[in-house]
Amino acid sequence: MLPTIGDVKAAAERIKGIAVRTPLIRNDALDAQTGAKVFVKAENLQRGGAFKMRGATNAIAALAPEVRARGVIAFSSGNHAIAVSTAAKRFGVGAVIVMPIDAPKIKLDTTRSLGAEVVTYDRVKESREEIGAKLSGDRGLAMIKPFDDPFVIAGQGTAGLEIGEEISPDIVFVPASGGGLSTGTALALPKARIFAVEPAEHNDIQRTLETGSIQRNAPGIRSICDGLLTEQMGELTYPIARARFERVVPVSDEAVLRAMKFAFRHLKLVLEPSGAASLAALLEGGVDVRGQTVAIIASGGNVDAETFVRALAV
Amino acid sequence: MLPTIGDVKAAAERIKGIAVRTPLIRNDALDAQTGAKVFVKAENLQRGGAFKMRGATNAIAALAPEVRARGVIAFSSGNHAIAVSTAAKRFGVGAVIVMPIDAPKIKLDTTRSLGAEVVTYDRVKESREEIGAKLSGDRGLAMIKPFDDPFVIAGQGTAGLEIGEEISPDIVFVPASGGGLSTGTALALPKARIFAVEPAEHNDIQRTLETGSIQRNAPGIRSICDGLLTEQMGELTYPIARARFERVVPVSDEAVLRAMKFAFRHLKLVLEPSGAASLAALLEGGVDVRGQTVAIIASGGNVDAETFVRALAV
């Protein structure tokens, strides 16, 4: 059963006081450079440093109390891990997180510091789904999926709902990988044109929409956008994407680094690569936005100092 | 005539639509580390990247139209320059800015890019006041003072007014140099305990309050906080400071750099050194804030990449 805008509104009620309402930021340089009226949804200022807090909180809040009490499990490249750990802590239950061994150190460290038990795996050789399923079965933990769950999609969509409460965007640029944030946002903003943004080499969504069936990325394809490296879209996110994504905008690592630098210099925001993807698509994606009201979702800010310094040097 | 909270409220009306309302940000790590309920007033997200937009806009808005039409002049280490240039542009009048030759390059470049005429001087050998007065007289320009003007003080105070509309802080940490922001904030929040923050070596305010008369800093004293290097307080800001500052908290360059790194890692905000001074005072100033509701004003984010990289390396 696909989630609806009603589920997004219910999620907004459920996450109140746990996930925070993030500001929608204007910037003169951004307007001048694009010729549009641009609003930046600063999800890097979300609790845990990324939008993932919204979906994780909604999913955990929706569990039956006796199920939740046994604890939760999640697999994640990082921000979902932080979000599930933080939300679990707020609900007073344990969390086990399955993370790739090559996840950014800041994300591994932060997850551990939140009291979660971290289990690492090799992104190229192992399947996180299998590891997760085994741990989940053995210990009776409730799996909090990263995107392909109606409560997670609806939760992420609250970012879009908040945008819609303040403005009526013509166009929304939103990073997409598993599709939780992008399809949730599409549900929340039924009148907006949705431009999904993905790493240029890691273009499963573009191929999925072109072919009309869910395509995978070959394992081992890398991008600086460590939060956008999901193998494929979900069974729930795909049909929403098919119905609502007007276009997929690919962004190169270089464009993402330049967007991070732009955010440093003009927006005064720290964005992680995945969090700067929508800004990169707006600035360099070749989309004609002149005269339009545009929202971009800056999805997170959990970035290592090394990567940030690299962006400042471009 | 000293400004009052009524003047701050009038300023809030006058600057609407030009200076923006900035968000008040919470952060779990900040609360955990301090034991307080901390709110960060993110003035780095202000138009122009610093709170200075508030006072400059209020002062220019208050000029008689025929005076304003001849143009304005200001002297500034940087953020006041950007603010006056931006506000003058919004009012459609010219701006001449007198800036120290060693101001951060980003601030010199930004001021020029805003269409202002920049006149540079040597901070150690020359008096910006004399240069400014001469240019002002020759061309009939209206001087927009950086702090010692009732409209500027009232304008900066709108940052405090916005804080007071959302919370009732027990304690406010605010950077102080000329005293515009700090005394304006004190006026706007009559019930809060005001902790003024200044660079440790550049401690004129501490000495001013101890001796009961306005003290100067020797020329040439440096600090990484380039926005907090005013020679002395003003005739208007001093009496307000004397009446309202509970304490002056000195911060070292190293503490400021660590605060910038904390803001990068936890708050996801880009802060310039002066903008991180209040955070440094909260984290390392030795003030007992446990159990208190604390507001800190993160006053700006206009920082060179070089300085930011230095902060990330501490």
Image (tube, coloured by chain):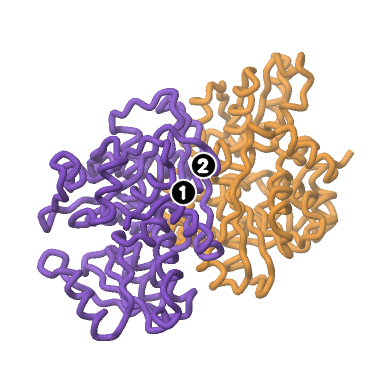
Chain colours: A purple, B orange
Q: Amino acid at mark 1?
A: Ala
Q: Quadrant of residue B64?
A: top right
Query: Could you say where residue B82 lies in the image, as x and y percent from the top left?
Result: 57, 32
* Residue ID at (22%, 41%): A252
Disc 2 marks a residue whose amino acid type is Ile
Q: Choose top left, top right, bottom left or bottom right for residue A246.
A: top left
Q: Nearer the viewer, residue A144 or B45?
A: A144
- Residue B206 vs A126, above or below: the answer is above
Does dot 1 land on a helix, a strand or a loop? Answer: strand
Extreme residue in the front direction: A1
Mark 1 belongs to chain: A
Chain ID for label 2? A
Asked whether the residues under the numbered discs 2 and 1 touch, taking CB atoms below 8 Å apart as contact, a structural biologist would say yes
Residue B271: give x, y in percent of width and height.
51, 50
Q: How many marks?
A: 2
Instruction: Name the quadrant of the C terminus of chain A.
Output: top left
Q: Say which residue label 2 marks.
A: A25
In this view of the protein, which residue sits in the foreground, A166 or A226?
Answer: A166
**Distance from the alpha carbon under mark 2 to that under mark 1:** 7 Å
Residue A231, placed above or below residue B170: above
For label 1, the residue is A42
Whether residue B287 appears in this view of the structure is yes
Placement of A65 over or under B115, stated as above or below: below
Q: Quadrant of the N terminus of chain A?
A: bottom left
Please state if B96 lies on the left or on the right of B147 as rendered. left
On residue B134, the disc is none
